[in-house]
Image (spheres, helix red, strand yellow):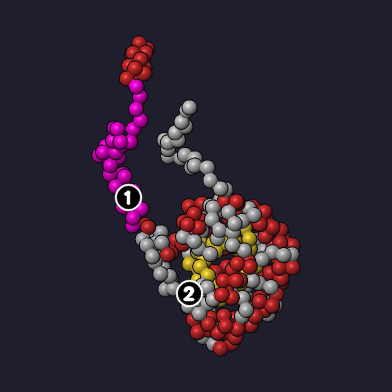
Amino acid sequence: MFRLISRRCYSVHGAPAKASASAVRQLTVKDIIDKYHNGSPISMVTAYDYITASWAQKANADMILVGDSVAMCSLGYESTTQLSLEEFKYHVASVCRAPGNAFVVVDMPFGSFEKSIPSGIENAFQLLHLNPRVQAVKVECGLAKNDYSLDYMRELIRRGIPVVGHIGLTPQRVHSLGGYKVQGNQQTADAIALYDVSQRLQEMGCFALVLECIPHKITSVISKKLQIPTIGIGAGPGTSGQVLVQSDLLGMLTGHVPKFVKTYANLQIDAVSALNQYVKEVQDKSFPKVGEHTFRVSDEVYQDFVSKVDKDT
């Protein structure tokens, strides 16, 4: 009888056979709604690739948002408005390869739906077709009663596509908002407009809303007046759940971190320190070590190899 022994010999090596990502039962819209009705806080975190999605899945996040913030957090752009749909699709597909049961929501990037409702619907279908694990789209919405995004979301919902609305600070509209500013904190009319649009989004069929950078007292009232989950970012504890950008909460980048972020780790310091150590050991030749990081060859094969090589010289 022969025993097959599998050893990891290379930097990229197949893992032991396991259930595929698509074989794992994901949370559904009903599960998210049930958590809301049970009063269980809903956790959402962004992910942009297989690694960050795997971390989020292993941490048992309820929802993963493949956000257009990938533009700044992973691709080095200055704004989310620079992200193309084709680039975004690559990241959506890689996130969906990570096994786990988190509910996956994807952004509709800037320019992917503004041209026309038919083209926007086609682009939403393209994202949904990438992988069956894509379960909903998120669309940023303005406050005007005739806002184009309202018509677009209504048409998506009519076609059976689950939609998460996004109000408050909407980064895709940062220029019209006058910058990255708190919303609904200056005039009563602004807060009322946020409330009104939240009600309209619920009425048309959004199953959840993201509320960004809104004073927590305003968000608490809006959330209490709704019968659907609200996911807050910079919106205080009065929402049904919270979402943070993974690179922010893990300290993966340098630069300004928004006030509402809690940094739970500083991976950049750890990563740079580890890489510095690696570079140092390569330079002083302490890595790799023979016997510890190398493979063996039998003396017979080695001697035969050397004798034949020597004959050729």
Q: Residue at x 62, y 79 (%)?
A: 227
Q: Residue furthest front?
A: 1
The secondary element bearing badge 2 is classed as loop
User: In this orientation, which residue lies closer to the viewer: 137 or 16?
Assistant: 16
> Could you tell me if residue 85 is visible in this image?
no
Q: Secondary structure at mark 1?
A: helix
Q: Residue at x 68, y 69 (%)?
A: 153
First to last magenta residue range: 269-298
Please determine whether, in this image, residue 23 is positioned above or below residue 205.
above
Question: Hey, which quadrant is residue 296 in on the image?
Answer: top left
Closer-to-camera residue (296/193): 296
Residue 304, image x, y percentages: 35, 15
Could you say where residue 13 lies in the image, as x and y percent from the top left? 47, 39
Q: Can you say whether 36 is above or below 78 in the image? A: below
- Between the residue at mark 1 and the residue at mark 2, the CA separation in whole angstroms equals 33 Å
Q: Which residue is mark 1?
A: 274
Quarter of the C terminus within the rendering: top left
Find residue 257 and report its horizontal and vertical position in percent.
41, 68
Identify the residue under disc 2: 234
Question: Which tag, 1 or 2, sits closer to the chain's start?
Answer: 2
What amino acid does circle 1 point to?
A: Ala
The residue type indicated by label 2 comes to: Gly
Q: Is residue 226 magenta?
A: no
Question: In the figure, is residue 18 to the left or right of 165?
Answer: left
Relative to 65, is 135 on the left or the right? right
